[in-house]
């Protein structure tokens, strides 16, 4: 079996009007995540290699962010946010680390081969635009934005996220019902579904998407 490569993503955040803002990049209309809005990041390269996978991913997240945006971040300043394993059905698969960090001052200078547009957006605004069909997102980005909606300042986000365990998502897809499923959902391993059973799923069959976690 071919080993799934590792990738890393960096969620850069800054204080905005009443809520944090995060940096999103729009990918070109080709390749992986074509036309989608994502956080800076990409796959691990040989010169990112370190003693363990997390440190390797930190190096990749910082390098990719610098290449794609011109913004420089200290790898030690990154806060592990989540780790995503892809559904089996995907043709292109990565195990992806998501990190969180304060967005330092500086102009975003895009590498056009990697991103065609960028915006600092409040998570709630990004999700609203996605729900209206004007901003394309993928489930890991959507769930991350939903998580970050709770925070009014970057400091508050750092305190809260730093006090919890890193979240791990091993995604399963139910195309027939338009669902992305994660551990904790009673249907995740094919169990019989009940009305009041535990849920950990994202409804992606139509807009706006809807997250259930109980």
Image (tube, rainbow, N blue to C red):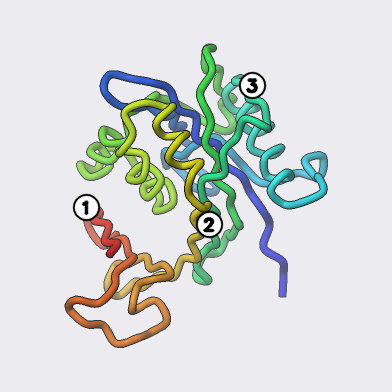
Dot placed on the residue nearer the N-terminal end, 3 or 1: 3
Please, what secondary structure does the residue beneath circle 1 have?
A: loop
Please, what secondary structure does the residue beneath circle 2 have?
A: strand
| Quadrant housing residue 61 | top right
Q: Position of residue 41 (x, y in %)?
A: 58, 38
Identify residue for label 2. 84
Q: Which mark is residue 72?
A: 3
| Left or right relative to 147: residue 169 | right
| Label 3 with label 1: CB-CB less than 8 Å | no
Q: Position of residue 202 (x, y in %)?
A: 31, 60
Q: Mark 1 Cα within 10 Å, few/some/many (few <14, many 20+)?
A: few
Q: Residue at x 51, y 44 (%)?
A: 30
| Quadrant housing residue 40 | top right
Dot placed on the residue nearer the N-terminal end, 1 or 2: 2
Disc 3 from disc 2: Cα separation: 24 Å
In the displayed structure, 195 sits above or below 168; it is below
């Amino acid at each position: 079996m071919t080993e799934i490569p590792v990738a890393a993503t960096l969620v850069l955040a800054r204080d905005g009007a009443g809520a944090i803002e995060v940096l999103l990049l729009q990918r070109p209309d080709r390749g992986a995540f074509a036309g989608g809005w994502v956080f800076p990041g990409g796959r691990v390269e040989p010169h990112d290699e370190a003693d363990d996978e997390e440190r390797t991913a930190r190096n990749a997240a910082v390098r990719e962010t610098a290449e794609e945006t011109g913004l420089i971040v200290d790898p030690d300043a990154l806060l592990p946010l989540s780790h995503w394993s892809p559904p089996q059905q995907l043709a292109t698969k990565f195990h992806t680390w998501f990190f969180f960090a304060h967005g330092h001052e500086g102009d975003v200078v895009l590498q056009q081969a990697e991103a065609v547009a960028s915006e600092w957006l409040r998570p709630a605004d990004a999700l609203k635009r996605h729900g209206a069909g004007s901003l394309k997102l993928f489930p890991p980005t959507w769930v991350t934005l939903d998580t970050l909606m709770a925070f009014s300042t970057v400091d508050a986000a750092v305190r809260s996220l730093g006090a919890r365990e890193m979240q791990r998502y091993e995604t399963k897809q139910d195309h027939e019902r338009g669902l992305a499923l994660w551990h904790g959902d009673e249907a995740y391993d094919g169990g019989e579904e009940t009305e009041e059973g535990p849920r950990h799923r994202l409804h992606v069959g139509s807009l706006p998407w809807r997250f259930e976690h109980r």
